[in-house]
Image: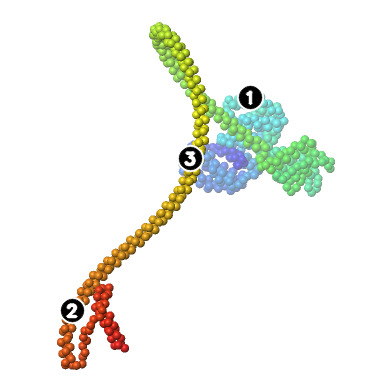
């Protein structure tokens, strides 16, 4: 994300250098040229149709950075992650487009390449807001490092004077103002141009190219075992070595990671100040000119390995982030302080207004107080006259009170005598109370005895109640049996009444049957009388038939319904006759 931010800063310079048409807009043709150049540098295919589609002529607003930046992120920067050589070419192209319009070379004592390096350093140190500027703290940081790189001593007073001039105008510088400041030689007086150029290059190598240390040292070969002088460049994640410091021919890289190490070696083979770099796949024996350089190289390599293990950025990048965080914190504190000052000022104004109101109220109160004082004096005069009259009345009353006091003294003596009598009576009452207490104690003993007797009586009463309950249960059971017998008796009485009713009914039925029997007997007698004549006639004429004559009746049979129609003898004859017929 930090690399993309730096690329966007470079593109911003190039974009703001484009010419505007009469309507104040950047033409699409210039955007196409800029986009084509960016794609060429990053070695990705350019798609002009996407640009046309992104910026349609729909009158929705001018073609500005707000409109071009989304296109830039989507169709160019998201396509490929650029490496270090591409970043340098990218910055060169943007520098070329922007410097033609904005850089004034007439007053510069530095070359175009040095101006380009200062421009890159500006992009690195500038704030992450547009338009891009670099604050005074970062300007001091850059000028201090440049002075140290040139071998000079930093003059604090000179920068403070410049800072005062800068603060009176503005709080920051643009890229072109920073280039003019360094190129004018204001902070490099007494230093030749070559030393200034070398100092700019050293700061550029450290801040932009992430070169933490560089110089000529001897390296022992892996195959021929000979010692060769190479130009070494230490970066946060690698060590590159070249034939010369012009970097024309690169001989190799030593990749660093968290597992790498460096350790000093004893002098051998006529070489002094030796140390060993242990990489992932190879180890490299290194020899430097003196012990100071040996210590510096070992410390620098150990620092890189430690940063890689912790996942932290290069020291100068981490320092820049810390400075920005500190500035943001100070800015927040300043804004909070200004807010508090504003609140205090508002409160002060409110207090001033309140004091003014209080002053007016005091003036009105003073007027009211004067009027009140006049009234008070008048009232006081009236009160003095009234008090004089009251004083005379009080003197008279005092005499009366003295007489009353004398009378009260006599009454007091009588009262004291009465109190003495009451005290004697009190002592007598105390004695009586003691006697009463003893009587109560005795009464308490008697009460406890009564309580025990009552408890025994209660126990007996409980037993009697249990006996009474058993008796009641027995009585209840007897009553239940008595009720059951009463129910049985009532049932029997009801059954007897029912039987009597049935008996009466049977008697009535017997009487009816008896009446029927008498009627039948009468009919039989009539029939018998009628039959006698018919029998004689048949006997006389036929002589074959024997009529059955009525015989003597036996004892009359009584049934449940009254006298029976046939006697037992008649029934026996009838039954035997049936048996003979059947047989």
Mark 1 and mark 2: Cα distance apart in space: 178 Å
- The colour scheme is rainbow
Judging from the image, what secondary structure is the residue with disc 1 in?
A: helix
Q: Where is residue 45 drawn, in percent x and y? A: 58, 48
The residue tagged 3 is 61
Residue pictured at 43% horizontal, 52% vertical = 471
Q: CA distance from mark 3 to mark 1?
A: 45 Å
| Mark whose residue sits in front, 3 or 1 | 1
Q: Nearer the viewer, residue 527 or 107?
A: 527
Of pointers 1 and 2, the one earlier in the residue sequence: 1
Position of residue 376 in the picture relative to residue 236 (left or right)? left
* Image quarter of the C terminus: bottom left
Which numbered dot is residue 522?
A: 2
Q: Earlier in the sequence, mark 3 or mark 1?
A: 3
Label 2 neighbourhood size at 10 Å, few (<14), some (14-19), many (20+)? Answer: few
Q: Residue at x 43, y 11 (%)?
A: 407
Tell me if I can see residue 113 in this picture. no
Residue 264 in view: yes
């Amino acid at each position: 994300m930090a690399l993309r931010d730096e690329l966007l800063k470079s593109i911003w310079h190039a974009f703001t250098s484009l010419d505007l048409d009469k309507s104040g807009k950047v033409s699409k043709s210039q955007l196409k040229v800029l986009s084509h150049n960016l794609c060429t540098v990053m070695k990705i295919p350019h798609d002009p149709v996407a640009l046309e589609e992104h910026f349609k002529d729909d009158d929705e607003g001018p073609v500005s950075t707000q409109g071009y930046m989304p296109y830039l992120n989507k169709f160019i920067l998201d396509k490929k992650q650029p490496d270090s050589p591409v970043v340098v070419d990218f910055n060169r192209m943007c520098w070329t487009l922007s410097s033609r319009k904005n850089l004034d070379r007439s007053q510069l004592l530095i070359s175009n390449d040095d101006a380009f390096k200062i421009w890159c350093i500006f992009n690195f140190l500038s704030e992450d807001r547009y338009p891009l500027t670099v604050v005074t703290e970062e300007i001091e940081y850059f000028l201090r490092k440049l002075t140290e790189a040139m071998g000079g001593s930093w003059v604090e007073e000179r920068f403070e004077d410049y800072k005062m001039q800068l603060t009176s105008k503005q709080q920051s510088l643009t890229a072109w103002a920073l280039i003019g400041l360094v190129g004018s030689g204001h902070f490099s007086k007494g230093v030749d141009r070559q030393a200034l150029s070398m100092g700019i290059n050293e700061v550029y190598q450290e801040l932009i190219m992430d070169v933490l240390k560089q110089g000529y040292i001897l390296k022992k070969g892996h195959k021929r075992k000979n010692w060769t002088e190479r130009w070494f460049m230490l970066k946060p994640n690698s060590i590159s070595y070249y034939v010369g410091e012009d970097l024309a021919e690169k001989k190799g890289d030593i990749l660093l990671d968290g597992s790498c190490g460096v350790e000093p070696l004893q002098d051998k083979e006529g070489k002094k100040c030796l140390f060993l770099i242990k990489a992932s796949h190879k180890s490299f024996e290194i020899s430097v000119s003196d012990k100071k350089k040996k210590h510096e190289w070992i410390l620098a390599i150990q620092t890189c390995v430690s940063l890689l293990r912790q996942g932290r950025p290069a020291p100068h990048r981490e320092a820049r982030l810390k400075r920005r965080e500190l500035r943001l914190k100070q800015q927040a504190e300043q804004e909070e302080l200004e807010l508090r000052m504003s609140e205090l000022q508002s409160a002060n104004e409110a207090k001033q207004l309140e004091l003014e109101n209080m002053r007016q109220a005091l003036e009105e109160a003073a007027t009211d107080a004067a009027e009140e004082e006049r009234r008070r004096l008048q009232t006081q005069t009236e009160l003095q006259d009234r008090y004089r009259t009251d004083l005379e009345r009080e003197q008279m009353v005092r005499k009366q009170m003295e007489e009353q006091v004398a009378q009260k003294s006599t009454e007091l003596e009588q009262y004291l005598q009465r109190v003495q009598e009451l005290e004697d009576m009190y002592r007598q009452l105390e004695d009586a109370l003691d006697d009463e207490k003893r009587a109560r104690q005795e009464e308490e003993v008697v009460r406890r005895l009564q309580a025990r007797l009552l408890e025994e009586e209660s126990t007996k009463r409980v037993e009697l109640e249990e006996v009474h309950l058993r008796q009641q249960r027995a009585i209840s059971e007897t009553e239940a049996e008595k009720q059951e017998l009463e129910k049985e008796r009532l049932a029997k009485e009801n059954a007897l009444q029912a039987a009597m009713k049935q008996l009466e009914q049977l008697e009535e039925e017997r009487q009816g049957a008896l009446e029927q029997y008498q009627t039948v007997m009468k009919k039989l007698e009539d029939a018998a009388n009628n039959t006698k004549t018919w029998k004689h006639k048949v006997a006389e004429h036929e002589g074959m038939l024997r009529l059955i004559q009525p015989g003597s009746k036996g004892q009359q049979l009584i049934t449940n319904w009254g006298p029976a129609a046939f006697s037992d003898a008649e029934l026996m004859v009838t039954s035997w006759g049936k048996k003979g017929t059947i047989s």
